[in-house]
Image (cartoon, rainbow, N blue to C red):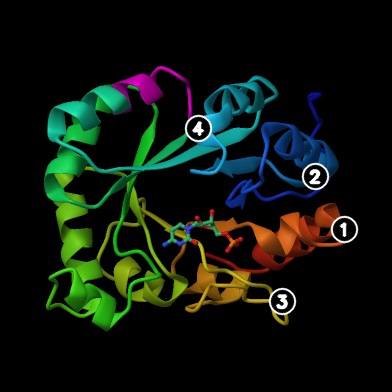
Amino acid sequence: MSETKNMTENDDRLYVALDLPSVAEAEAMVETLGDAVQSYKIGLQLLPIGGVEFGQRLKAIGKNVFYDFKFHDIGATVAKATRSIAGLNADLLTVHARPDVMRSAVEGRGDSALKILGVTVLTSLDRQALRDIGYSDTAEDLVMRRVGQALDAGIDGVVSSPLEAAIIRANVPTDFLVVTPGVRPAGADAGDQKRIATPATALSSGASHLVIGRPITQAPDPRAAALAIAAEMRGVSC
Ligand code: C5P
């Protein structure tokens, strides 16, 4: 991978999800996108097969890197795992938004610049699925309970559906990050995402960053798709 000069109008609030089967394919996608994309999310598909080292190479060429580990373990383990990531000069890390997990992640990141995001409620969980695992709250009530706990724990933001961005934004400080997957440009295939919004709607609802994967990585021209989304994002005044 080579360093790219920022000649085109990218938007660093757009994190492209590199959900691809191999690091080689992810590297090829980064080459294709070039200066059209500044920020990347590396998730569970790539993390076990060299995704962390790949993320470090992205940092070395000046990109922003989000490791989507969704940590959920006993406090001591979360603190130590977060300390390991904090040593890698990454930008964002996810943990599940449980009070003990979030507090431990804050302890583990110490005074590094790593920002911690809490995953509130997975967008794949509906009311019945929540009941099945023992939660009587609605998804929205549970999200807001966890946003309050995230603020108490001192993490930097949350991951949520774009449909919850507005109610979250109304209840948090302006510098609190609200990062939304489930974003689809108008007319794009929703895939398995159920609760979706366009890039402009997600931002105007209060999202600080967008995570978008397949509408870019599976597009016939990924670079053109990324640039079109960046242009739509720039049109929203936040
Ligand atoms: O391809 P697509 O745009 O649907 O990718 C969305 C990304 O955001 C995926 O990497 C997915 O794992 C992640 N994500 C999500 N919903 C959540 C949390 C993370 O779609 N609630």
Q: Secondary structure at mark 3?
A: loop
In the image, the segment drawn in magenta is 82-90
| Residue at 21% from the left image edge and 42% from the top image edge | 102
Among numbered discs 1 and 3, the one appearing first in the sequence: 3
Among numbered discs 3 and 4, the one appearing first in the sequence: 4
Whether disc 1's CB lies below 8 Å from ligand 1 is answered no
Residue 86: numbered disc: none
Q: Pointer 3: what residue?
A: 188
Dot 2 surroundings within 10 Å: few (below 14), some, or many (20 or more)? many
Identify residue type, mark 4.
Answer: Pro
Among numbered discs 4 and 1, the one appearing first in the sequence: 4
Q: Pointer 1: what residue?
A: 221
Identify residue type, mark 3.
Answer: Ala
Identify residue type, mark 2.
Answer: Leu
Q: Is residue 77 left or right of residue 199?
A: left
Q: Secondary structure at mark 1?
A: loop
Residue 33: numbered disc: 2
- The label nearer to you, 4 versus 2, is 4
Among numbered discs 4 and 2, the one appearing first in the sequence: 2
Q: Choose between 205 and 140: the one closer to the eye.
A: 140
